[in-house]
Image (cartoon, rainbow, N blue to C red):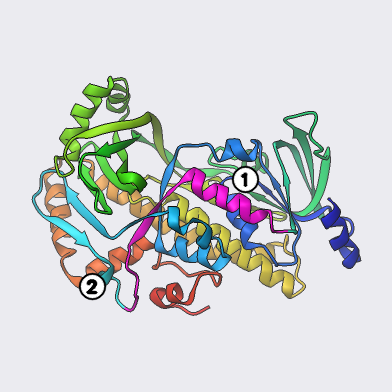
Amino acid sequence: MGTVSKLQKQNPVEQDYDYDLAIVGGGIVGTTLACALKGSGLTVALIEAQSQSEAAAKGQAYNLSLLSSQIYQGIDVWSRVASQMTPYRKIRLSDSDFPKVIEFLPQDLPATSASVLGYVAEHGVLLKALQEFLRDCTNVKWLCPARVAQAVYQPKGVELTLTASDDLLEIPAAIRVRLVVAADGVHSQIRQSAGIGTHGWQYWQSCIVATIAPEKSHQNIAYERFWPSGPFAILPLAQNRCRIVWTAPHAEAQALAALDDTQFLQELNRRYGNQMGQLSLVGSRYVFPVKLMQASRYILPGLALVGDAAHCCHPVGGQGLNLGIQDAAALAEVLKTAHQQGEDIASLKVLRRYERWRRLENLVILSFTDFLDRMFSNTWLPLVVLRRLGLRSLQIQLMKTAALKLMTGFSSRCPAIALDQARFVAGRSH
């Protein structure tokens, strides 16, 4: 804590605090927030239950929107990962066996020179880059592996009791901070212990996630095909691999996951089609249930929620992680501005700016993904006719551009940390 002590000596008013804020959760969203606070003048404790290597070892992959890539450019992380991100230059949207296919191209986003529509990021690649970036952030201290055993919210500050996962680690028994940020996932213990409720529901579906290697090139195309059982997405990865996200009712998903590789590939071919030739599996596949959740509030005095601790949505459209990245950028902007103006970063007056910014925007995306899943995951004839008329409407350039701005994140308010191009496309100025 040598760095923290020096900073505190420069600001004796804050000597009662070990850190200005503690971020609980060292996943992608939590580390993004810590990175965005570099040079802010705020001291940060980053608390993670796993070691850094364990946290980065997950085999997940995510859709990374253009706005998210702009945020990482603004933080100055993008140069570390750009060569390892897989861009996609075309999106193909279709409805089961309906012959009409809607294609989205970069030129469908007017007033931008973007040559891609998004990226696919592998978990380990992105999180390791964020972890490495934080090594140069003298205002951030890793406390991991460690857990928060108790959080006591006081009128002036929060007392966190910590337990180390390894007795040999020099983890303090307790720290005192001005603000706690919960980035500890959908089952957030910080949110639950603070008594913040949630609204939402479990879907009747689960997702099967797997990586495959097609015989032919994926040509950097992302696919979203809607079947009555649920959406089926194909995302391009490096080394001509693809990530599939296959949504199906729970029993069907479990039955598919229980098939041997040969049988699974046979079923996969029926959904995937033959556009890429013969398919082979790479690594293991796993299943997870799908849910929608929105916290009843994002803030309390001394507490803010970000990422899955605040919300989660259906994976259709790949928006989940991007919402969390935007949360982190928005909260960082609010906190830095408040700190520069001498305001209390833990006050409701300050934190409400973050909640007003992000809660409604997240609700729009949550509602949109719920609408898509319910609209397309059925065979009721009136809805089938309606949704196919909707697909035809996407041939109209105005409709196509509006849909694409939603998918790329540019329909949301753009954080100041993002580059000018993103702000221009979003049609806003901050």
Apparent side of residue 154 relative to residue 429 in the rendered image (left or right) = right
Residue lying at 16% horizontally and 64% vertically, measured from the top left = 393
Work out whether residue 56 or residue 267 is closer to the camera in this orientation and state it: 56
State the residue in front, 276 or 371. 276
Amino acid found under the numbered disc labelled 1 = Gly
Q: Secondary structure at mark 1?
A: loop
Residue denoted by label 2: 398
Question: Could you tell me which residue is drawn at 58 percent across and 55 percent down?
Answer: 32
Q: Given the image, on which type of amino acid does mark 2 rest?
A: Leu
* Residue at screen point 51% across, 70% down: 418
Q: Which region shows up in magenta?
A: 111-137
- Which-is-in-front pick, marks 2 and 1? 1
Residue identified by numbered label 1: 26
Q: Residue furthest left?
A: 99
Above or below, comparing residue 357 to residue 153 in the picture: below
Image location of residue 1, percent across then percent down: 83, 50
Give the structural element (helix, strand or loop) at label 2: helix
Q: Earlier in the sequence, mark 2 or mark 1?
A: 1
Q: Is residue 310 visible?
A: no
Q: Quadrant of residue 167?
A: top right
